[in-house]
């Protein structure tokens, strides 16, 4: 019985370590998936994203230029700015400043037809 418990704990701890090691599609230092990415999140500019429908997934490339409050930041590309919501767990220990270029995958969030557009970030990486 003790052997079964020991093996089960060993398997469980190994699977947590393997799952924790995945850092996205292009992090070659740790390893991970290198094939095609999800085409549902299309690359667009901030200006284009502001005119898209609520709950549409987009990929943006630009800079996080300002911290507004809590998990709200100002994101800017060469077309416009938009507020992005970045949960603490998405930073993955990475330090990002206003001069760093990042890629953000997120969901457009509109509370109503005349409300401001925000992007709820699902994943991001420093480029």
Image (cartoon, helix red, strand yellow):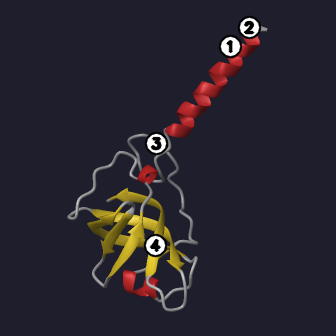
14 to the left or right of 70: right
Tags 4 and 3 touching, CB below 8 Å: no
What kind of element bears circle 1? Answer: helix
Q: Rounded to the nearest whole Å, what is the CA distance between mark 2 and mark 4?
A: 50 Å
Question: Do the residues bearing badges 2 and 1 touch, measured as CB atoms within 8 Å?
Answer: yes
Towards the viewer: 69 or 37: 69
Disc 1 to disc 3, how far (Cα)?
28 Å
Circle 3 is placed at which residue position? 31
Is 127 on the left or on the right of 85, as rendered? left
- What distance separates the C-alpha of mark 4 from that of mark 1? 45 Å
Residue neighbourhood size for the residue with mark 3, other residues' Cα within 10 Å, grouped as few (<14), some (14–19), many (≥20): few
Report the front residue among 32 and 107: 107
Q: Residue at x 48, y 53 (%)?
A: 25
Q: Which tag, 4 or 1, sits closer to the chain's start?
A: 1
Task: Classify mark 2: residues with Cα within 10 Å, few (<14), some (14-19) or many (20+).
Answer: few
- Residue tagged 2: 2
Left/right placement of residue 32 relative to residue 100 reads right
User: Which numbered disc covers residue 6?
Assistant: 1
- Count neighbours of disc 1 (C-alpha within 10 A) and say few if under 14, some if 14 to 19, many if 20 or more: few
Q: Viewer-proximal residue, 81 or 30? A: 81
Question: Disc 2, disc 4: CB below 8 Å?
Answer: no
Q: Quadrant of the C terminus?
A: bottom left
**Which label number is shown at residue 119?**
4
Q: CA distance from mark 4 to mark 3?
A: 28 Å
Disc 1 vs disc 3: which is toward the camera? 1
* Outermost top residue: 2
Q: Position of residue 28 (x, y in %)?
A: 40, 45
């Amino acid at each position: 019985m003790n052997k079964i418990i020991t093996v089960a704990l060993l398997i469980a701890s190994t699977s947590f370590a393997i799952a924790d090691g995945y850092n996205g599609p292009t992090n070659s230092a740790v390893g991970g998936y290198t094939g095609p990415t999800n085409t549902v999140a299309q690359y667009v500019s901030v200006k284009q994203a502001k005119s898209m429908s609520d709950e549409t997934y987009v990929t943006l490339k630009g800079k996080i230029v300002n911290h507004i409050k809590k998990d709200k930041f100002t994101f800017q590309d060469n077309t416009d700015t938009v507020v992005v919501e970045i949960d603490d767990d998405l930073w993955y220990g990475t330090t990002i400043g206003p001069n760093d270029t990042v890629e953000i995958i997120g969901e457009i969030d509109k509370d109503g037809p005349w409300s401001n557009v925000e992007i709820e970030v699902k994943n991001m990486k420093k480029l």
